[in-house]
Image (cartoon, rainbow, N blue to C red):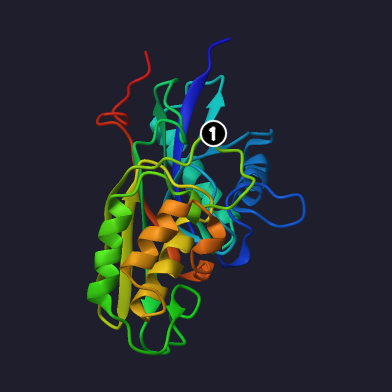
């Protein structure tokens, strides 16, 4: 029986969820979405996401794929997306659903992912769920020197949770820098892949650098020792946002045969 693959583009506020992936003892975005889809389509549909996100982490852009035996026209997919949004809670939003080639995989076909981490320099009741309020002076120039060291790093064992099921801790970082955006300091990082907890560990360590708790030589030693205990504490999840996932050029330009 022929299978047709569909991609779904969505966004979510991760405040009330234990991440994207289903959890045995906690609410997840995946579970909430699959249950809403079952209510509309009257069948179980298994979703494969672009990757894990930690509890409390947000996604401004996220992709999942699912397979069906029907070739569904785009007008019907648009209607389904509209209906699905009416069933979902306010903190999950479907942007679009569209057909893709059967081999395109939401996780393994992605070529890069970009995260932003927001640090509030002033207390704000409106940004409390989406940024980390940090009082005190920060040496941003030094933090950017540290970010350049991060870009030169390949093995991110020092910034990964232990006892994960990853085969390798090698990642290729192509962008890492800090910049001000209004009253917030924003860290942007892009890589071909990320390890569990990696971005939050990197941010926590670079913030220690900016507060002069460590220096650049310390950061180099942390990277070289490949020991998570050497790096700084993970920055709070609420400041982390997955903002972009890239796929091969033309991957979404697909017409079913």
**Quadrant in the rendering for residue 96:** top left
At 49% from the left edge and 63% from the top edge, which residue is drawn?
231
Query: Which residue occupies the foreground of this view, 12 or 144?
Result: 144
Q: Where residue 144 sits in the image (x, y, percent)?
A: 25, 67
Query: Which residue occupies the foreground of this view, 63 or 236?
Result: 236
Residue at the outermost top position: 1
Give above or below for 204 relative to 95.
below
Give above or below for 74 relative to 246.
above
Query: Quarter holding the N terminus?
Result: top right
At 31% from the left edge and 67% from the top edge, which residue is drawn?
216
Total tally of numbered discs in the picture: 1
Residue topped by disc 1: 167
Q: Where residue 138 sits in the image (x, y, percent)?
A: 32, 82
Residue at the outermost right position: 25
Is residue 253 at least partly visible in the picture? yes
At 41% from the left edge and 28% from the top edge, which residue is drawn?
99
Is residue 180 at least partly visible in the picture? no
Give above or below for 34 relative to 61.
above
Give above or below for 20 relative to 120.
above
Query: Quarter holding the C terminus?
Result: top left
Which SS class for mark 1? loop
Q: Where residue 4 sits in the image (x, y, percent)?
A: 49, 21
Q: Where residue 12 sits in the image (x, y, percent)?
A: 49, 58
The crowding category of the residue bearing disc 1, from other C-alpha atoms within 10 Å (few below 14, some 14 to 19, many at least 20), is: few
At 51% from the left edge and 41% from the top edge, which residue is drawn?
80
């Amino acid at each position: 029986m022929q299978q047709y693959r569909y991609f779904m583009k969505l966004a979510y506020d991760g405040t009330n969820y234990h991440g994207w992936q289903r959890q045995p003892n906690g609410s997840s975005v995946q579970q909430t979405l699959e249950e809403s889809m079952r209510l509309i389509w009257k069948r179980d549909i298994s979703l494969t996401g672009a990757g894990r996100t930690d509890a409390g982490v947000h996604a401004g852009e996220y992709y999942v794929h699912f397979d069906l035996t029907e070739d569904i026209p785009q007008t019907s997919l648009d209607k389904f997306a509209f209906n699905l949004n009416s069933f979902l809670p306010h903190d999950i939003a479907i942007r679009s659903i569209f057909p893709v080639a059967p081999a395109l995989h939401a996780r393994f076909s992605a070529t890069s992912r970009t995260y932003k981490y927001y640090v509030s320099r002033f207390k704000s009741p409106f940004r409390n769920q989406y940024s980390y309020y940090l009082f005190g002076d920060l040496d941003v120039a030094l933090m950017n020197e540290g970010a350049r060291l991060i870009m030169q790093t390949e093995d991110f064992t020092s910034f990964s949770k232990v006892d994960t099921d990853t085969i390798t801790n090698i990642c290729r970082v192509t962008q890492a820098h800090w910049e001000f955006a209004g009253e917030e300091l924003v860290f942007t990082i892009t890589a071909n892949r990320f390890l569990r907890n990696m971005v939050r560990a990197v941010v926590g360590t670079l913030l220690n650098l900016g507060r002069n708790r460590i220096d650049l030589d310390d950061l180099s030693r942390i990277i070289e020792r490949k020991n998570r205990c050497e790096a700084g504490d993970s920055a709070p999840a609420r400041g982390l946002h997955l903002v972009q996932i890239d796929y091969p050029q033309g991957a979404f330009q697909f017409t079913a045969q």
